[in-house]
Image: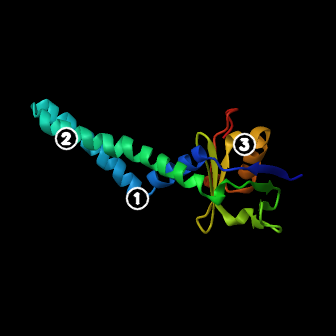
């Protein structure tokens, strides 16, 4: 029996996806390394008594590790206000794959389970990546009671090495 979920993308879920997507990529990892390197420089300059340079590097730490993620969230929120991503989308999960049907799309699109390469859960979202690096973003809050059934189906139909979904009931 297919599992139907209607999703209306919200800015919090999209911001979480964007932060995950950016900070797991090369530029995001480089930014994190640079941020923690600046933490080391700050500590080093404080230990040497050079408080002016410590302050400069502390500002770099604040910008890289705290202001960039806030800027990303703010940009996503502003973009979501004028986006068609806020239109509801119906996802239908079954044994064969996932059918996606948007409000303005009569026929919808279907992708077999073999077309997905990775499934990840974050604090508020489940992300399914297809082989073309497109993402299906499912806010956990909007999945409601169907969350366990959907994650079980994903885990059953995708290779175990491709599924990194944690469930609230302790199952992986």
Taking the view exactly as shown, the residue that stands out farthest to the left is: 49
Residue depicted at 79% across the width and 44% down the height: 149
Question: What secondary structure is found at the residue carrying circle 1?
Answer: helix
Q: Which residue is mark 3?
A: 142
Q: Position of residue 163 (x, y in %)?
A: 64, 51
Crowding at mark 1 (Cα within 10 Å: few <14, some 14-19, many 20+)? few
Disc 1 or disc 3, which is closer to the eye? 3
Gap in Å between the C-alphas at discs 2 and 1? 25 Å
The residue nearer to you, when weighing 135 against 79, is 79
Q: CA distance from mark 2 to mark 3?
A: 43 Å
Q: Which mark is residue 26?
A: 1
Above-or-below relation of 99 to 55: below
Q: Earlier in the sequence, mark 1 or mark 3?
A: 1
Q: Which residue carries the number 2 mark?
A: 56
Please tell me which residue is depicted at 81% across the width and 62% down the height of the picture.
Answer: 96
**Residue 40 visible somewhere in the drawing:** no
Q: Is residue 114 above or below residue 142?
A: below
Q: Earlier in the sequence, mark 2 or mark 3?
A: 2
- Determine the residue positioned at 69% across, 66% down: 115
Say whether residue 27 is left or right of residue 14: left
What residue is at 68 percent from the left and 49 percent from the top?
138
Left or right position of 155 against 27: right
């Amino acid at each position: 029996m297919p599992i139907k979920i209607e999703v209306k993308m919200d800015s919090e879920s999209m911001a979480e996806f964007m932060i995950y997507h950016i900070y797991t990529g090369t530029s995001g990892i480089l930014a994190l390394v640079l941020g923690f390197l600046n933490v080391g420089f700050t500590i080093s300059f404080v230990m040497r008594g050079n408080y002016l340079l410590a302050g400069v590097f502390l500002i770099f730490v604040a910008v890289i590790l705290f202001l960039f993620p806030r800027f990303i969230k703010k940009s996503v929120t502003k973009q979501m206000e004028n986006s068609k991503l806020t239109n509801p989308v119906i996802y239908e999960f079954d044994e064969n794959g996932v059918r996606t049907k948007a409000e303005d799309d009569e026929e919808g699109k279907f992708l077999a389970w073999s077309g997905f390469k990775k499934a990840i859960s974050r604090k508020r979202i489940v992300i399914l990546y297809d082989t073309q690096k497109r993402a299906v973003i499912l806010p956990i809050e909007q999945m409601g009671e169907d969350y366990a059934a959907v994650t079980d189906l994903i885990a059953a139909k995708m290779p175990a090495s491709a599924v990194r979904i944690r469930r609230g009931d302790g199952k992986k």
